[in-house]
Each structure stands twice: as structure tokens, then as C-alpha cells.
């Protein structure tokens, strides 16, 4: 499984811990995030994640910024992306089961690192239910 990760300055520590977790799980990780806490523009680190996921079927993305909102808004500009802002494990699961989300957006200022790792774990193991949800997902792109 290929996973792209991107973050701004608010998500550096989260990204590093999540990458450690993913590598322990033998996942292939592509890092597009910043490695310093110096202020950066999150779109510069989020668009590459969206492009990676849209060009690699079956891959996932993880994006992290302070609120998770700016990252999710940026990622969702790509027509093949369904980025879900998640702040708990249930939302992470539902975003996959019902929305076939392919990117999880994590709000670093509102969840702990342990919570973020739990959400990522749930996100990558949860399958899309399809069925009645598929026709709705098909209506998402403009």
C-alpha cells in the first residue's frame, strides 16, 4: 500500500510519528510535508499529496495542518480526491465506509498524536461499503 503524507508547520511532529507507525506496518510512505516548524503555505505541501493519490489508484493520503480545514479544502480541489476532515476514530471509519475517502485530513491543534495514529490505522484498514453509497460518491465531482 502506498501512502502520501503532507503537512504544514503545525503538523511536523504528527507527521513524523505517523510515518514511524506506517513504516512499522510495512507501508510505503512518500513524504511531501515540511520538516521544520517555520511557517509555510500548506497548499505547497498538500497539492503534491492529492496529485500522488489521484495518479496512484488504491493509494491513500494523510494531510495535516492546524485545523485540518485548509488542508482538506486544498486537497478537495483535485477532482479525484475525497479528503475527509476527521477528529475522532468514528469519523475516520465512516469517511471510508460511506464516502470512500482517499485522504484523511488531521487537525493537529485539536487531536493528540495518539488519536491521530488511531484514526490513520482505522482509515487505512476500513473498506468502502459501496452499495447505496456508491451512487452518492459518484455525484461528488463537479
Image: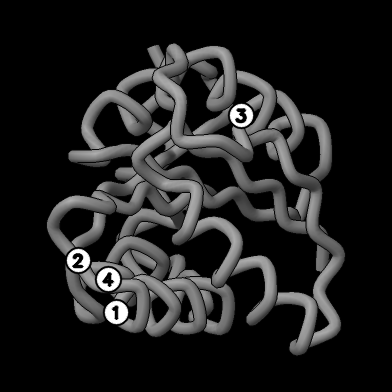
- Select label 3 or label 4 by which is in front: 3
Mark 4 vs mark 1: in front: 1
- What crowding class fits label 1: few (fewer than 14 Cα within 10 Å), some (14-19), or many (20 or more)? some
Sequence-first tag of 2 and 3 = 3
Mark earlier in primary sequence (4, 1): 4
Cα separation between marks 3 and 1: 23 Å
Looking at this view, is 100 or 83 the one in front?
A: 83
Q: Are marks 4 and 1 in contact (CB under 8 Å)?
A: no
Element under label 4? Answer: helix
The residue that mark 4 highlights is: 94
* Lower sequence index among marks 3 and 4: 3
Q: Residues within 10 Å of mark 3 (few under 14, many from 20)?
A: many
Instruction: State how far apart marks 4 and 1 are (Cα).
Output: 16 Å
The nearer-to-camera label among 2 and 4 is 2
Would you call the spot at circle 2 few (<14 residues within 10 Å), some (14-19), or many (20 or more)? some
Residue identifier under label 1? 115
Compared to residue 63, the image places residue 54 above or below, namely above
Q: In x, y percent, where is residue 50? A: 61, 29
Work out how far the residue at label 2 is from the one at label 3, CA to CA, in angstroms: 23 Å
Amino acid at each position: 500500500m502506498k501512502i502520501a503524507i503532507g503537512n504544514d508547520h503545525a503538523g511536523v511532529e504528527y507527521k513524523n510519528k505517523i510515518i514511524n507507525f506506517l513504516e512499522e506496518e510495512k507501508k510505503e510512505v512518500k513524504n511531501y510535508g515540511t520538516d521544520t516548524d517555520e511557517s509555510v503555505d500548506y497548499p505547497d505541501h498538500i497539492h503534491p499529496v492529492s496529485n500522488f493519490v489521484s495518479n496512484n489508484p488504491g493509494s491513500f493520503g494523510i494531510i495535516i495542518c492546524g485545523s485540518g480545514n485548509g488542508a482538506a479544502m486544498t486537497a478537495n480541489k483535485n477532482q479525484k480526491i475525497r479528503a475527509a476532515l476527521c477528529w475522532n476514530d468514528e469519523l475516520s471509519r465512516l469517511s471510508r465506509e460511506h464516502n470512500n475517502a482517499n485522504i484523511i485530513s488531521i487537525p493537529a491543534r485539536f487531536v493528540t498524536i495518539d488519536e491521530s495514529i488511531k484514526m490513520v490505522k482505522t482509515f487505512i484498514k476500513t473498506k468502502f461499503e459501496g452499495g447505496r453509497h456508491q451512487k452518492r460518491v459518484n455525484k461528488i465531482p463537479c
